[in-house]
Image (tube, grey):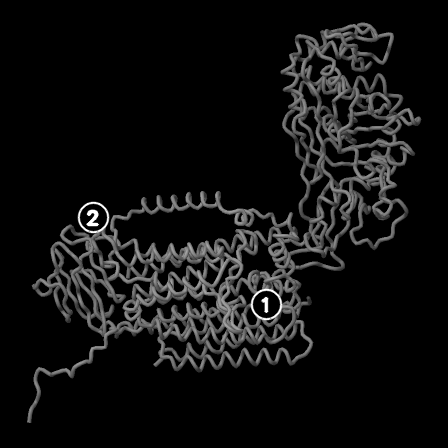
Amino acid sequence: MKSIKRTQRIITLIILLFAAGMALLVLKILHESSFYMMNSDKRELGYVYDRKGDVLFDGTGQGQYPDNYFIDCGNIIGDDKGQMDNTLVAQNLEKLNNYGFSEGLRHSGGKAAIYTTLNHAANRAVYDSYGYMHGCVAAYNYKTGEMLVCTSLPSLDVTKGYDNLNQFEDATLMSKTLYGTVPGSTQKVSTVISALEIMGSSQLFSKSYTCYGKYTNRTGNDIDCHNIYGHGTQNIQEAFENSCNPFFAQLVEDDDLPLDKLKKQYEKMGYVLNGGKPQYIDINGIQCATASTTLEDKYQFKTQWGCIGQGDTLVSPIQLMMWESAIANGTGKMTMPYFIDHVTDLNGKIKEKAKTRYSDKIFSEETASTVKQIMLTNGADRYSYLINGYTVGVKSGTAQVEEGAKENSLLVGFVDDPSLPVAFCILIENKASGSLTTEQVAQVLLDNLKNNY
Amino acid sequence: MNSLNLILCAVAAAALDVCILILIITAYCEKRSSKKKWHTVSQDMELVEQNRIYELGCDEVLIGRHASADIRLPDMSVSRYHAILTVAEGVWTIRDIGSKSGVYVNGNLIRESALHENDEIKLGNRRLVFRKRRSERVR
Amino acid sequence: MYANPVAYIFSCLFVLIAHSAMLVNIWFNGNYSETKDIAVLGAAVIILDIAYFVIILFFKQSSYVLDFLLILVLNMSMIFQSCFGKVGFDKKHFITCIVCLAACKGSYILCKNHKLLQKNKKFIYAAIGVILLIMLLFTNAENMWLEIGPLSIQPSEFLKPLFVLACATSIADQQHKHKVLMFNVVYDNLVVFGIMAAICLVQVKSHDYGSLPTFVSIYAVGFLLRICYPKAKFSKKKLIAGIIAGIVCLCIALKYAPDYVQHRLHVDIWSDKTGDGYQQSQALIAIANGGWFGVGPGKGFLVNVFAHENDIVFATVSEEWGLFFSLMMILTIIVITAVPLINPARSYYHGTMSACISAAFIVQMALNIFGSCNLIPFTGVTVPFISEGGSSLMVCGIMVGMLIAAQSPVFKEPKQTKQEEPVPAWRWQE
């Protein structure tokens, strides 16, 4: 009867709603069970390997390794102790756990592992080349996005624990590649890109300014050149090679380079301007700072100094390296770096195979090819005898930190070779404390990558 | 947890499954028997209007024009809720529930009346016959 | 006489097999020190099964399937509760189960004649009034329990079956209209609305927000099944508008709800793992730890968590017996509520009653399971049949009894006018 049917319909509806909720719950549990398990006290971690199967982190804690075996990547791979948060292992613990909903927690013989793209041998060689100096190196394949080298000094061997934590040097527990540093003249690459985007190639190349060793801008502040005798009249290519500060100050002041367009282009490239909210690039859960600078008034010292790469400007080495990829690829799109090539579950089944991803277009192809040419010419003119055997496009930089008390040396660049598509960023802190140069590190880096590729 | 234990768990769950299945089958068996029981309780009656047969499936059957009525007679001469049929102790009773045109049983206007086999009920312009249920095969 | 002896025998057999399979599982996978523990538990379960199978034959019902389902799920819960932590016979739960079965049969006898119930609706209203009064006088926000000697009773539980009876209605009742100021009014509906309001007020006063949704769902089902009749012009549009208005009211109420309610609604259990999110996060970890087939009866760690045997019982069962098995347990309870779909009630009163009971069971189950798994705010309600707790189990028994009554109704006029000897129209006289 209709009336009784009505009661039945209501019961059916309630049961169906409940069943739908139950299905949702089961799906949620299946999907999130490994996360739940990570929150329990029990975990059985697996290994992190480099691209050749070399161990970078041993979650079982049972393997025997030489002293300081993991020191070159200690602060980027990290561990599960909770001391370092922004590391590969800390951010991907869930993937490393030997747990599956059907299988439960496997106490021995689980095959859960993270296979990274790092090259341990090259990483180690680069680390060793620093000696007692501090700094960091990031290098990746700008075609695929595989991170090949990522090291930061000082570092630590995670197997030794944290008992003498307060004796660690500053910044031991963080990878400097991820955090902002003063870029020095490497910032001029961004300024050239912006100028090319706004003016176009022919107009920029038609500009020439004269450097007398220093330039007094319209508000009366001095922009010093590192060459106190001045570089004379130069075009953009020469100024880029000379890394001439007065030239770039005058370029920023030029009426053909309006500030709002400059700001727009900087923001497009990932800069956070004038104290905005910091942004991060996510690399397998690791947060990498982007760039920030101050652009307020084009006639003011602070803004010009920012465009030259000093003052308030901060860029993380990985961000610098990523811009190189957009230039080297010739597309104007950055290749997004990644550390994890693939992950295996506890049965050894491969899951989460990495894919190459690109950023949005940050500048045009023409700009990319022009900047590429400028940098390659710079590399050929100035660095062919310093970095032997590679066609490199580079820009060096010297950053004044601690209010000019110390100078950091930087080198960003890429190799223009389809068989070795590497973009890199090298930072040596307080370069006056030793005789190491960025070119030497680049030589070690590229040699090792080439031999082990 | 070895495979034997796993099998045992699966067996326990399967036994429960089978048990639930058997109980559902039992419920369907009981549906048939309780339908039979209902037919004895309700004296196996039905309402017939020309070619349409209305089953009397529960102890209160509402007749009217409204969509919520059990027996819907879409005719303007029938009130929204016209009459109600109830059964008790095997006797069906028809009762007028405030209709405009009244309820006639065998031609007599009534407010409440017990029904007998082959009574003719007139609601507005509609005529229904109260009769013994005929099995499907006969039709 | 019962019409399906074959079905009866098969049902008995398979209920026994299901319970035996669980006991065998304990035997091989369980955590026990002595075989005696399992023997006692097994004997108790099997004896209770067989005894109930025999006893139900004395109640001449036309349908026994709900009895089988009830004993199946009760002994299942008996086995679950006995295995938490370590296998051992849970005497208290066993006694509650027997009380539950007795309550079931009792309520069946009381409810099988719907005419009688309708006639005595006044007493139902009175009983609700008395319970509400008791709740107002003897319980408060800190203590919802009423202590009588060694027993502690939760009076709000007993409101549920009574409220179901009050919400159930017959078509004839709905046609009893009275004209009050141009409005057609059915007194019965007003009374039910008043009771609902009173229950809400008392529950809010005693801060028992957990069981409020159950009452609301019972009332909603009762209301939906009533509005079809007295106000024929109650259109779908009005209904939808009403629902929207209700949701808006709810949102406003939530916005201005007291702090401790707000706090409960927004708990990020993973960032507060040791505080307010403790039970839920532990429950989810336990489910993850159990996997599909569980860690084995008595081997779970969730027994160390407070209220493992009632508020988060789903997770405890999931951990020890596996998610698959606990889903089967849920399925059993759903089948109980779905029996009225297979075998429909024969009177509107029983039909509405079944719908209200199904709503009560399922809403309560949903609140508990989804609450303990962090889909909705956590409330301290129990899973029907499975959770430990005398009052709740007894009330579940009563409600199943009412479902059975709807399956095996008795059609008799309440007034037993003495039947006169039928006088034949013609009598052969000597």
Residue C429 lies, in percent from the top left, at 6, 91
As helix, strand or loop, the secondary structure at mark 1 comes to: helix
Q: Is residue A303 visible?
A: yes
Quadrant of the frame with the N terminus of chain C: bottom left
Which quadrant of the view contains residue B51?
Answer: bottom left
> Total label count?
2
Outermost residue, front direction?
C137
Which amino acid type is marked by label 2? Met
Identify which residue, B16 or A22, lies in the foreground: A22
Circle 2 is placed at which residue position? Answer: C182
The chain under label 1 reads B
In the displayed structure image, the side of residue A324 where residue C43 appears, left or right: left
**Mark carried by residue A186:** none
Which quadrant of the view contains residue C93?
Answer: bottom right
In the displayed structure image, the side of residue A9 where residue A35 appears, left or right: right
In the displayed structure image, the side of residue B116 where residue C172 appears, left or right: right
Q: Is residue A303 above or below residue C97?
A: above
**Mark carried by residue B10:** 1
Which amino acid type is marked by label 1? Ala
Q: Is residue C36 above or below residue A379?
A: below
> Badge 2: few (under 14), some or many (20 or more) residues near its Cα, within 10 Å?
few
The chain under label 2 reads C
- Labels 1 and 2 touching (C-beta < 8 A): no
